[in-house]
Image (cartoon, helix red, strand yellow):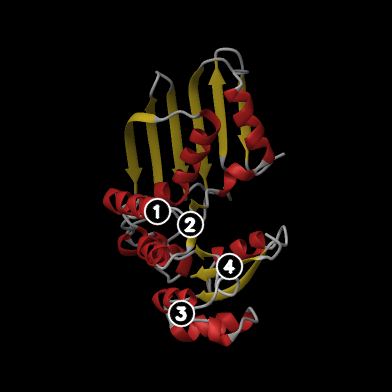
Amino acid sequence: MSRKLKMGMVGGGKDAFIGAVHRLAANLDGKIELVAGAFSSTPTKSHESGALLLLDPKRVYDSYEAMAAAEAKLPVGERIDFVSIVTPNFAHFPAAKTFLEAGFNVVCDKPMTLNLQEALDLRDLVRRTRKVFALTHNYTGYPMVKEARERVRAGALGTILKVVAEYPQGWLLNPIDQAGQKQAAWRTDPQRAGASSCIGDIGTHAENLTHYITGLEIEELCADFTIFVEGRRLEDDGNLLLHYRGGARGVLYASQISCGEENNLMIRVYGTKASLEWHQEHPN
C-alpha cells in the first residue's frame, strides 16, 4: 500500500493511560496516521482530546457507535482502515462487534471479552465478516522473545518440562482505587474489569508469553486469588499451578501489591537439554 493506513481510536482520551502508548507505537514506522476517534464516553472529553491531537473536528465523535456509522459512509481511502480499541475491559466486545459489523478491521486491547460466550460470538463474527481482529499482547514483539520462541521450536531446549512465568507490580499496594485514581478504580471494579483484576490485567500477558514461546496449552490449573487491600472487590494477587498437555508443568503468578516492583515480567523455560529466561525490564 502506497499510502499510510488510517487509524481510528476508541478510548484513549486525555485522561487515559494506554491510549497515548498506542499512538506512539503506531507512529514508530511512519505507516499509520490517526484520523478519527471517539476518545471518551463523555462527549466533551472526546472532543477536547481530538482537539489536542489536532484532528478534524468532524472526525471526532460522541460515541463509538456514531463513529462506526459515520466512517462507514466515507469512501475507501478516506475512511479509517482499522480501529484501535483501548477502553476499559467492559467495552471491548460491544465496540469490536460494532466495528466488525460496519466492515472495519479491529485491533483490541486484552481481554478480548468478559466471558467465554462473548468470545465465541466474536470469533464467529470475525469468521463471518472476514475482517482482521488482533489483540495487543505486545510483549511478544521483543526481539529476544522471538529468538526464545525460535530456539524452543527448533528443539534447542529438548522436551519442555517446566515453565515459570512471573509478573509482579506494586502500584496497587495501597488503596488508590478507593481514593479515586482512575486507572486503579476501573481495574478493580467487576462491572468494568470483569471477573478478574490482577490475573486478567497482567497475568494474561504472562500466559500469552508462555504460550508464544513454548506452544504449550493449559490442560488443568489450580488458582489461588487473594485480595490483600481491604475493601477491594477483585484480586490484587494471583498464583496458578499449571498442567500442560503433554506433561509439562508450570507456575504462573501475577501481583500488583508487590512492594518495590514496577513491571517485572519474566519467564523461565526448562527443558531436557537446556533452559532459557527473559526479563522484560532488561529485554535485550
Can you identify the residue that label 3 sits on?
Answer: 70
Q: Looking at the image, is mark 3 or mark 2 nearer the viewer?
A: 3
Q: Which residue is mark 2?
A: 109
Marks 3 and 4, Cα distance to the nearest angstrom?
Answer: 14 Å
Q: Could you tell me which residue is drawn at 49 percent across and 52 percent down?
A: 134
- Report helix, strand or loop for mark 1: helix
Mark 1–mark 4 distance (CA, rounded to whole Å) = 19 Å
Q: Quadrant of the N terminus?
A: bottom right
Amino acid type, label 3: Ala
Where residue 232 sits in the image (x, y, percent)?
Answer: 34, 58
Residue 156: image x %, image y %? 63, 18
Q: Which tag is nearer the camera, tag 1 or tag 2?
A: 1
Q: Which residue is mark 4?
A: 7
| CB contact under 8 Å: marks 3 and 4 | no
Above or below 209: residue 188: below
Q: Does residue 277 appear to the left or right of 168 in the view shown?
A: right
Judging from the image, what secondary structure is the residue with disc 3 in? helix
Distance from the alpha carbon under mark 4 to that under mark 2: 15 Å
Classify mark 3: residues with Cα within 10 Å, few (<14), some (14-19) or many (20+): some
Kindly indicate whether the residue at mark 2 contacts the one at mark 4 (C-beta within 8 angstroms).
no
- Under tag 4, what secondary structure? strand
First along the sequence among labels 1 and 2: 2
- Label pair 3/2, CB-CB below 8 angstroms: no
Name the foreground residue: 39 vs 82: 82
Q: Toward the viewer: 191 or 30? A: 30
- Nearest to the eye among marks 3 and 4: give it: 3
Query: Which quadrant holds residue 187?
Result: bottom left
Query: Which residue, given by chain and number where applicable, does mark 1 sit on?
Result: 126
Q: Position of residue 183 (x, y in %)?
A: 47, 65
Q: Nearer the viewer, residue 115 or 32?
A: 32
